[in-house]
Structures are given as structure tokens and as C-alpha cells.
Image (cartoon, rainbow, N blue to C red):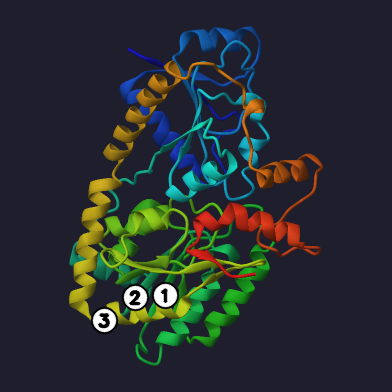
Amino acid sequence: MIRIGFITPASGPAEQKSVDRVWRRLEEALAAEFELVRYPGAAEGVAWRAFLDRVEAVVVPHPIRADRSGSLRKPFLHLALGTLPLGGLRFLRMLADLSNADSILISCRADQAIVERVFPRREIGASFLPFGVDLDVFRPLGEAAREAARAAHGLQAAAPVLVYAGRVTRPKNVHLLLDMVAALRPEFPGIRLVVAGGPEPLDSEADSYREELDARARDLGGAVVFAGPLDDTRLAELLSAADVFVTATVNRDENFGFAAVEAMACGLPVVGTEWGGLKDTVAPGETGVLMATRVADTDVRVDAPAGVAAIRRLLADPALRRNMAERALARAREHYGLDSFRRHTVRIVREAIDRAAGIGEAIPGTRFELHPLAMESLVYSQLGVQRDWYGRVPGFTPEDARLRRFFMEPYASGSEPR
């Protein structure tokens, strides 16, 4: 049996639920097919060398500084998660720890485009690994469960119900969802938006942003329900009680979008942003509608009126809503179950081993060709200069705007002219 190394996190579970979930499911998928050799220590010294000698490839689910001397031909598979739009710094800072035998595991095509921008000669591989959701938990529930979930959240049986699930942060654009509800209320006076989730850990804006949302919600006279964070079972119940899933996210780490896929698995159409992973998971016109996004110098602009129009059509046309819901469910079951994730994982690892065997000369990442703007991003980082791609810090400069367009454009529909 092929032995695969797995670098276990040194600090326990990740702060973000979705990151911890990906780590665990990746480990489970590998252990189901390969002999998994876990390594929790520092990536250097005698123990590290012995570990590398035992395995044919190493899966790296989180950043690690590794001694690659003598092991450049051994493939390392690095999980990108949401790191690429923020200057690609996770990989730029660890060039000495990379090899042309390696691959970056990406979960959306936008990330692949960023990798190709950063490394124009494609010295490092990029393997597309869409994540999976638990289809035994996230599935359509019966009418009784739907009615019970509505009652639990104070929702009337016949009310049009929209659901957002995820972090409650400004880049997730929850405030824009409230504005969209306000635009829909004249035609659908009983409409409700249920927001399931809480702030991001260590978010310095969390309190002020929630106060802003509460003030806007009061102006909507009970149309918004803040449900707080929910476990998977309760979230699945809520999703099954809704009519449409909505998200206006332009968050930089929206490299997959678990909540949208979980909603599809529960039989909900999605009205979301054409952004990051949603461009892969949601099929526009079939399983939902995507609002165009455009990167500007200091923000990302969302075509919210198009989202309002899409929600209006779905709420006014039960047949259209039912058709999209059925297609969403079918797409989730075909592409985004845990079995699919395991198959993709196994295939990618085998392909990475084959690719490494045929590379010819093994070279370290320090010899990779970088795009000039990627090099500029790295220099800023080495100088300790803090860059804020959302443009919310004093002193945001034209240089910042150039870099953020370079790294974030692949996530969006396009860019605003300068």
C-alpha cells in the first residue's frame, strides 16, 4: 500500500469551522485509501528525514516551513484554502520550501488563475480539489420538519423565507442582503431573511458591524431574524424550511462556499455572487443566479439589483423555484458529496506522484519565475508593510490598488475601469 505523509496541525482545531472540517475530511479521505503516516513535529532533523524516507508523497494541509534538502523530488501537496487572493503570500513566503515536484490543492478555478498569474511558467502544479458536504445531514426534509423549523424561528408557514448562512462580517456583505430585502418588501410584505452565523474570531469590527446590522434590521420591522451559529443538523433543518439561499459575499477566502453547496443539497436554489468558488458550484440559470462582481480600486462592487430581480422571479414563480431546486439538489449529489471528495483526493495524490516521477531536474521554489507584481507583494511582506486588499486602512495607495486587482480579479466577474 502506498504510504502518504500527512502534516498534522500543531495547534489543535482551526479557528474557522470550515477549515477544521476540510483538514479532518482530507485526512479521512487519505486514510481510506493509503497508509497514512502522520507527522506532528518540526519539519527538520533526524525524525523529519526518517519520516520523508517512509512516504511517497506529503500532504500539507496548513503552512509549514520544511527542510527540503535531498527531498526536492518528493511531491508535497499544499492545501491553498483561502490564501491566494491575499497576495499569494502563503506560497511566496515559503519558496525555499517548495519544489517543482509539488502541487497546490485548489478548490476553485479562480485560485488556479491566480497560481498561473503568480507562477507564469507553471513550475508548480495546481490540482483542482472541490470539497464535499455530508449528504446524509444536508438533504431535503419532509413537510413536518419544514413546519417545525419555521415555527422554531418564528416564521409563518406561508412567508417567503430567504436564508443566509456563514460568517457575519462586512466582506460577506450581510448588510447588502438587508438592503435587498428592503427592496423586496413592497411586493412581498411578509418576506423574512434568516441570518445563521456569527462573527469571525478576532474580528475587530464584529461589535460595530453587528450594531449596524441591528439598526438596519429594526428599520425593516421584523423582516430579519438573527439565528446565531447553528450546528449542521439545525442548519439543515433551517435550509429545508427556506425558499431561497442568498449570499452577497466578496470575502477573499470564498474559495469554495460550503453554505451554498449545503443549501443546494437541501434542495434550495441559490442567489449569490459571481465570486470565487461560487462560480464553480452554482450553475447560473440552472441551480440559481449569480450577481456580477467587479473589482475596483478600493472595493468590490456587486450587482445587487440583479439579485433582487432574481429573488423576485423565484418567489413569484413556484414552478421556476421548484425546477431550480431540483437541479441544485441533483448537482450537489453528483459533484459535492463526501464520496466524490474522496475519489478526487485519491486521484490527485496518484497524479501528483506520477507527475513528480517525470519532472526531469528537480528545482527549489527559489528558482521559480515570479510575475513582477507577485514579487512586489513578496517584497512588501518582507519589509513588514501591512497591505489591506479591502482598502479600509489609512494610506491606501495606487500600489495597493494595482496589487489587489492583480490578485483578486480572478475571483470576480471583471474589473471596473480605472
Find residue 250 and name its label. none
Disc 1 marks which residue?
193
Q: SS of the residue at dot 3?
A: loop
Q: Is residue 189 visible?
A: yes
Between label 1 and label 3, give the one nearer the viewer: 1
Residue type, numbered disc 3? Ala
Disc 2 marks which residue?
161
Q: Is residue 244 left or right of residue 178?
A: left
Residue type, numbered disc 2? Val
Instruction: Tell me residue 3's x, y (percent).
Output: 40, 14
Between label 3 and label 2, give the one nearer the viewer: 2
The Cα atoms of the two marked residues, 1 and 2, are separated by 6 Å
Residue type, numbered disc 1? Leu
Quadrant where the C terminus is found in the figure: bottom right
Instruction: Tell me residue 252's x, y (percent).
Output: 56, 55
Q: Is residue 166 left or right of residue 234?
A: right
Q: Assess disc 3: are there few (<14), some (14-19) or many (≥20) residues with their C-alpha within 10 Å of its C-alpha.
A: few
Q: Is residue 135 visible?
A: no
- Badge 1 or badge 3: first in the primary sequence: 3
The Cα atoms of the two marked residues, 3 and 2, are separated by 9 Å
Instruction: Tell me residue 206's x, y (percent).
Output: 64, 63
